[in-house]
Image (cartoon, rainbow, N blue to C red):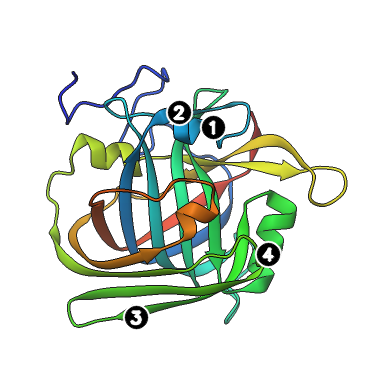
Amino acid sequence: MRPADAPDTSSSPAAISATRPTPLGAWWLRNRWDELTFLHWPYEPAVVQALLPNGLTADTFDGQAWVSLVPFQMREATPRWCPPIPWVSNFAETNVRTYVVDSAGNRAVWFFSLEADRLPIVAFARLLLGFPYVWADLAVERTTTGRRYETAGRRWPSRPNSSTEVEIEIGDVIAEPSDLDVFLTARWGTVAQWPTGRLGRWGKLRHHPVDHPEWTLRSAELVSCDDRSFQAAGLPAPTGQPIVRYVDGIDARFGRPIRV
C-alpha cells in the first residue's frame, strides 16, 4: 500500500502544485473566501464516480476519493469591471464538493451543491453558469475560540431539503501542510455542466480556471456536526471523524470558462 502521505497521481498526468503551475491569463470574476472551514471525508471512488457526469473521473489519494463540506463567508463577489455591490456581493455559503479530473486532464473541483443566501447570485450562477446553487437560509457566527455555521433550510429549489450545523475550534497555522492537504486544496479550476436550450436542460462541461495565493491552513477541531447535505446530494452519510482545516481568508480570481 502507498504511504499515507503520498498522493495517487495515476488518474491524471497533471501534477499537484501548491501554487498555480501556469499563469491564469485574463480573468473576469473576483471574490474573497473568508472564515472558511474544510471538513474532508474519504469515500470509495465508485460511490463518488456514480454521481459524476460523463467526462469526469473521481480523483483519488491513496486509493480513496474525498468529499468535503465547506462553509464560509463570501465577500466582494463581483465581475472584474464592476465594484462590489452592497448586500449582493457579500453572503454566507456552504458547499459540498469532490475532486475530479476532467477530459482535458485538469484536476478540478466538482460541486454537488452550493448553498447561498442571496437569490440574485443563486439565479445567475445556476441558470447561466450551470453551478448547482441553492437559495437557503445561512449564518456564520463567531464563537470565543472558533466558528459556528448553520444552514436552516433551502428556499429554492426547496427539494431535496437539507440542513447543516457545524461548530469548530480554530487551532494554529500549519507550517508544512501534508501532501493530502495540498491534494484537497490545490485545485486550480472548477467544472460545471452548463445549461443549453431551454432552462433546466444540462449540456456540455465547462472548466472554470481559478487562481489564488497559496493556502495558509490552520488546524481545527470539530465540536459538533449535524449535516444533511451529503444525503441530499445522493451520497451516503459520511462516517468517522473528518480532517478539519480552517482558513482566515483568501482572494480568488476566475478565468473565462473553457469547454472540455
Against 44, residue 82 (above or below) is below
In contact (CB < 8 Å): disc 4 and disc 2:
no
Label 1 environment density (alpha carbons within 10 Å; few <14, some 14–19, many ≥20): few
Disc 4 vs disc 3: which is toward the camera?
4
Q: Count neighbours of disc 2 (C-alpha within 10 A) and say few if under 14, some if 14 to 19, many if 20 or more.
A: few
Please state the horizontal and vertical placement of residue 29, each as a whole percent of the image. Answer: 58, 56
Q: Position of residue 256 (x, y in %)?
A: 63, 43
Q: Residues within 10 Å of mark 4 (few under 14, many from 20)?
A: few
Q: Quadrant of residue 113?
A: bottom right
CB under 8 Å between discs 2 and 1: yes
- Say which residue appears at 52% left-offset and 65% top-offset: 162
What is the CA distance from the residue labelled 4 to the residue labelled 1? 23 Å
SS type, badge 3: strand
Examine the rendered structure and indicate whether residue 38 appears above or below residue 171. above
Q: Earlier in the sequence, mark 3 or mark 2?
A: 2
Residue under numbered circle 1: 50
Cα–Cα span, label 3 and label 1:
35 Å
Residue type at mark 4 is Pro
Name the residue carrying label 4.
157
Q: Residue at x 61, y 63 (%)?
A: 134
* Residue 43 in the image: above or below residue 84: above
Q: Tell me which numbered mark, 4 or 2, is placed earlier along the sequence.
A: 2
Residue at the outermost right position? 198
Q: Is residue 90 visible?
A: no
First of labels 4, 1 by sequence position = 1
Q: Which residue has dot 3 on it?
A: 141
Which numbered disc, 4 or 2, marks the residue closer to the eye?
Answer: 2
Q: Which residue appears at 58% of the width and 44% of the height?
A: 26
Residue at x 71%, y 43% (from the top left corner): 194
Circle 2 residue: 46
Cα distance, mark 2 to mark 1? 6 Å
